[in-house]
Image (cartoon, coloured by chain):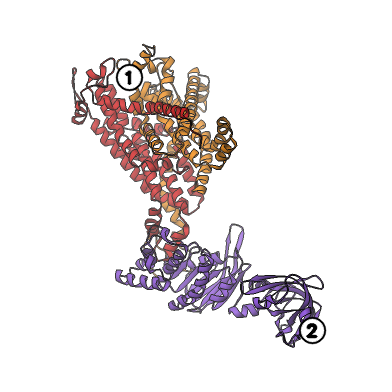
Chain colours: A red, B purple, C orange
Amino acid sequence: MQRQTVIGRGVRVVLLTLVGLFFLFPIFWVLLMSFQTNQDILRIPPSLVFTPTLENYGALISGRLESTAGVLEIRFMNNLMNSVILAVSSVALSLLLGIPAAYAFARFKFRLGEDIAFTLLSFRFAPPLLVLLPLALYFQQMGLIDTYIGLIWVYQLITLPLILWIVRGYFEDISEDIEHAYRLDGNGWFKTFTRIAIPLAKPGIAAATLLSFIFAWNNFVFALILASADKQPVTVGALAFVTASGIQYGQIAASIVLSVTPTLLLALYAQRYLVEGLSLGAVKG
Amino acid sequence: MSYLSLGKLKKRFKNEVVLDGASLDVERGETVVVFGPSGCGKTVLLRLIAGINEPDSGTVHIAGQEVTYLAPEHRDVGMAFQNFALYPHLSAFDNIASPLSARGVARGEIERRVHEVAGLLKIDHVLHHLPKALSNGQKQRTSLGRALAGNPGVLLLDDPLRNVDAKLRYEMRLELPRVLKAFETTVIYVTQDYKEAMALGDRVAVLMGGGFRQVDRPASIYKDPDGTDVARLFGDPTVNLVPGTIEGGTVTALGARFPLAVSLADGPCQIAIRPESITVTLDEATSAGATPVDLGIGEDTHAVPVELDAVTPLNVRAVMLLRTADGRELLATCSEDEASRLPRGHGRGHAHIRAADLLLFDPAGRRVRPGERQ
Amino acid sequence: MATEALGRPVMDGSRRPFMRRALPYLLSLPALLVCIGILIPFGTAVYYSLQRYNLAFPMTRGFIWFENYTLLFTDPGFWNTVRVSLLYTLYTVGFELVLGLAIAMLLQRRSFFNNTMSILLLLPLMIAPAIAALMWKLMTNPGFGILSYFASLLGFPDFKWASASSSALFTVVLIDIWVYTPFMMVLLLAGLRALPRQPFEAAELDGVPQSFVFFRITLPMLTPYIITASLFRMLESIQQFDIIYAMTQGGPGNSLMVFQVAAYLERYQYTNVGRSAAILMVLWAITFLLSNIFIKQWLRLRERARGVA
C-alpha cells in the first residue's frame, strides 16, 4: 500500500528485529538455561558457549533432586500429569455440555437461553476470586476440595463460556434449511445434530477447543485456592518448586520449559484457529 | 378425502398475520402450483406442510392421517429448497442418497435409485463432486434429485427455478413436468412466475391476503379470473383495467357500447381486457381500402379510436402503448410480424375489441358472472 | 400410535408434542446447572461482604450491613489498592495498545516473513502468566539474570527490578506487556487486514501525507477493533493476579497490592473473609460495568465480521 523507500525498509527491518528480540529472547534464554549446569548459569558475563546437559531434565523426570543440602523429592512430573488431566477433562466436559447448549441457543431463540449465555459470559470476565473464596468453603463441606472433580467443575468457568460463544456463532452461520432438508429426508433431530450441525461447525469447535485448552492449562488461581500439592497443575507446581528448590536454577528453567511446551506446540500446530478463537469469533482469521 | 388436505391454516409471526385460514385439497398424483405475490406466505405454507413450522391453528392431513404437529421426518414429504440447502460436506451422490440411507435402504438399492434419479436429471457425471464444485444448475438438479429420491408421498418445490439463469429455467420448465410425471407423486410447487405456474400446474392455487383466492386449471384462471387482483397477476404485459357502466343489457366503456350476452344489473363496473384480445389498425391502412375483415378482425368487434404512442418489441411479440380519446392508456400485443407493418411512433387508428373478450368485475374488483345477480 | 422412545415425537400428528417444546431447555440444562453453580457462591460472596466474618474470631461473626465497605472506603490501604490497580491497568493497556498497533502496522502487508513473524509473536500469549512471571524472575535475578546484566551494562549495576518498591510496578507492567501485547497485535492486525482498500488507494493517488492517512483514515476505521481489544485487556488487567502474585505476592511493602492480591491476602493471611469479599465486590462492580460495554462492542464487531465473511 505504502511506497517503500530503502530507508523505510531499513527502519522496518530494524524495528521488527527489536520486536522479535523482545518477545522471543526470554523464551530462548530460558530454553538455554534449562540445558546449563548451575556453574554455567552463574558465570558472569553470560556466555552462549557451554556444554549442554540433560541433567536438569533428568532430575525433574526421576523426581530426585540432589543438591549440597541433600536429596530433595520433587513431584514435578506429577504436576505435569495433573495439568494434562485437568485441561483435557475440563475441555472434554465443556464440549459435552457446551455444544448442545450452543446449538440450543443458536437454533431455538428462547429467553432463558439468552440469559444463561450472558450470565456465563459475564462471569467469564468477573474476578475469579469472588466466586472461588466462598466456593472453597462449600467445597470443604462437600468434600470436593482438592479433588479433580471439584477442579474440573470450577474450570468450566473459563472453558464453557468460550466454547459456548464461539461454537454458537458457527451454528448460527449454518443455514437452517440444510437441517430442515435432513429432517425431511427422514432423520430425527439428534441425527441431524450429529451428522449435519456438528460436522459443519467443526472449524469453530476446533478453535474453541484449542483456546479453551490453552486457557485451562495456563490457569493458576483456581488450583492455588482449591488444590493441595498432589492435585496442583504445573502453573502452581512450578511456583512451589521455585520456593522448594532454592538455587537449582537449571531445574527451574527446565520445569518452565516443560510447562510451556504443550501450549506452544499446540498453538504453532493449530495457529490458523488462534485468531478467531482469541476474539471469540469477532474477527475472522 | 383428498391426498393432501389443508384445513383453515392460520400462522402469524410476531404481529404479522401470514396465513389466515388457508384451505386447499390436492388429489393424489396432482401437481398444484401455489402462486402469489412475494410475501404472500407461499413458503410458510410449504413449511407448515413439511412440519418445519407449526400452524397457530388449522390442520394438515396427508393420506387421510392428521400430521399437523408431526415431526418432519415422519411425514413422507420431500422438499426442494429455493436456496438448494445441499449438505456442503457430502458429495452430490450422498446428498441424493440421503433420504434412502435414512430409511435404511440397502447399499446396492441406493446405488441403483440414485443413478436412476441422476440419469433422469442428467447429473450422472457430477455425482462424486461436493456441492461447492457444482454449477448452479447442477446444484438445483441435485436438490431436486434429493427431494425425489425417497419417492415421497408429497413433494414440495419451493420456487426451485428462482436461483438459476434464464436459459436453464426455460429448459427446466419444459423438462420438469416429464420428471414429475415419472414419479407419479403429489406435488405442491411454489413460484412467483406466472408462466411457470401456467406451464407446470394441473391446477393453480392463487394465494393472496392469507388465503387461497382462486384454485383452478391454468387456462381457466387466465380466461376466467375471480377478481381484478387475480387477473392482474397473470399475463405479461398485465391486463388492462378500465371503468365501465352496465345499462340495459349493454356495457359502455372507452366510449364504445358493447352488448352483453347475459343480463346483469345496471351500475358501474370494472372491465379487464387482455392485451392480446385488442387488435389495432391504423387509419392509413384502412383508408387505403382494407376493411377490418381483411385484417382478420371479426364482425362482432367494436372499434375504439386510439392513438398509437409507442411500439416495443418483446421476444416474438410486440407491445403497443395506446391512448384513448379520454387519455386512458391501453396495452395491446401483436406478433412481431404485424408490428413490422406498423409505423414506429405516433399514428392514429382504432382498437378493435370483441364483446366476448371483456371480463367484467364489480367496483370492488369481484368477478361479475352471468346469473350472479347483484 | 405408540409412544416412542424419549426425544422422538408421539406418532399422533394432532397434538403438539411436549418433547419438541422441551428440547431447547433439555439441551441447555447442563449449562444452566453450571450457571447456578456460579450464582450460588456469588450470592454467598455478597452475603459475606455484609458480615463481620473473620475465621480467626468465629465468635464475633455477625451481620453488619455495609460496615465492611465504609471501613474500606476510609482506609488509605484500600485507596492504595485502587490507585495501584488503576495505574497498572492504565500502563499495561496503554503501552500494549500503542505497541500492538505499531507491530500490527509493521506486519500489515501479507508476506511469508510477516505471517511467520505474527505467529511467532503469539508465543508469549500462550505461556501461562504465572510461568511468564517465573521466567522474568530468572531473568531479573540479581546474581545471574540476563536483564540484571544488561542493566549493569547500561549503568544501573544495582537495579532491583521487582524487589524495590520504586521499580516493582515497572517490572510487572513489563511482564504484562510481554505476555499480552501479542493479543492486541493479533486483533489489530486482523482488523487492519479487514479494512477496505479503496480509501488508502485514493489517498495514495492524491499524494496525501502518511501521517494524515494514519490519523484520518486508518485510526477511525480501526476504532471498533481498538475499543474491543482495549476493553478486553482492561477487564483482565484490572483483575491481574497471576503475574503479581507469582512475582512478589503484592510486595515489596504494598507497592503492588492490586484488588485480587489484596483480597487473597485478606482472606488467607488475615483470615478476614468479610473484608476480602467486600474488596472483591468493589472490583466486581468495576468489571461488571466494563464487561457490559465490552460484550456490546464485541457482539457488534462479530455481526460485522459475519456480514463480511
The residue under the point 32% across, 30% down is A235
**Is residue C58 among the parts visible in the rendering?**
no
The answer to whether A281 is drawn above or below residue C121 in the figure is: below
Q: Looking at the rendering, which quadrant does residue B367 occupy?
A: bottom right
Q: Which residue is mark 1?
A: C146
The answer to whether C65 is drawn above or below residue B303 in the figure is: above
Label 1 marks a residue whose chain is: C
| Number of dots carrying numbers | 2
Give coordinates of residue A2: x percent, y percent. Answer: 51, 35
Q: Is residue B169 left or right of residue B245?
A: left
Give coordinates of residue A3: x percent, y percent. Answer: 51, 34
Q: Which residue is mark 2?
A: B250
Q: Is residue C233 left or right of residue A91?
A: right
Question: Are the residues under badges 2 and 1 in a single subunit?
Answer: no
Q: Nearer the viewer, residue B65 or B114?
A: B114
Residue with the most extreme front position: B288
Label 2 marks a residue whose chain is: B
